[in-house]
């Protein structure tokens, strides 16, 4: 005859706690993969961070109140997303304004077509041996401004 002992008490499994933990792990994975892939696939990263934060913030308030563990990766993803968008916007504005300035400064007619002035450019300068000069390069290379051809040996 087998003596029966009382069964060990089984702690109740809190389903909400398990769901919160699983959502937290999923959120950190989404955030981490987004971070790891940011420099090669920034749009993928941004999408993953949106999913990680939306998984928390799109839930009703009572459910969010029970998801305290999921909260940290959701906020981390959201703040990273905001930071990336702000920095990207600032860099884009700076590059756009720089590009606009360089186009006004250089006035290119096409690839490889550089000149420093418009005097007689389209109709001849009156000097048969005259060659167009790139003023930006002439400022960097004193030999060009002294009349020495740029391709002459030093």
Image (spheres, rainbow, N blue to C red):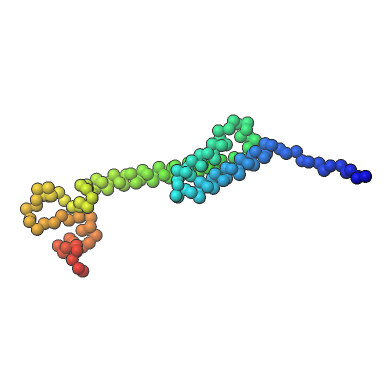
Q: Is residue 83 visible?
A: no
For the N terminus, the quadrant is top right
Question: What's the residue at 20%, 47% (across, down)?
Answer: 109
Task: Give the left or right position of residue 146, taking residue 2 as reference.
Answer: left
Residue 75 place in picture, x, y as percent: 55, 41
Q: Is residue 89 above or below residue 134?
A: above
Q: Is residue 52 above or below residue 143?
A: above
Looking at this view, is 39 or 99 the one in front?
Answer: 39
For the C terminus, the quadrant is bottom left
Residue 10 place in picture, x, y as percent: 78, 41
Question: What's the residue at 13%, 49% (across, down)?
Answer: 121
Question: What's the residue at 39%, 46% (across, down)?
Answer: 91
Q: Quadrant of residue 13?
A: top right
Residue 102 place in picture, x, y as percent: 27, 48
Task: Give the left or right position of residue 22, taking residue 149 as reference.
Answer: right
Q: Residue furthest front?
A: 1
Task: Give the left or right position of residue 18, taking residue 154 as reference.
Answer: right
């Amino acid at each position: 005859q087998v003596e029966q002992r009382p069964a060990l008490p089984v702690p109740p499994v809190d389903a909400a706690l398990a769901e919160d933990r699983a959502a937290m792990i999923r959120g950190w994975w989404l955030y981490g993969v987004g971070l790891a892939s940011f420099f090669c696939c920034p749009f993928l990263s941004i999408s993953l961070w949106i999913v990680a934060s939306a998984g928390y913030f799109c839930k009703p308030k009572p459910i969010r109140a029970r998801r305290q563990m999921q909260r940290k990766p959701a906020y981390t993803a959201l703040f990273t997303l905001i930071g990336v968008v702000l920095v990207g916007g600032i860099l884009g504005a700076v590059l756009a304004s720089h590009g606009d300035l360089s186009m006004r400064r250089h006035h290119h007619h096409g690839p490889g077509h550089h000149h420093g002035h418009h005097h007689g450019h389209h109709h001849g300068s009156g000097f048969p041996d005259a060659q167009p000069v790139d003023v930006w390069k002439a400022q960097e290379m004193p030999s060009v401004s002294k009349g020495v051809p740029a391709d002459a040996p030093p």
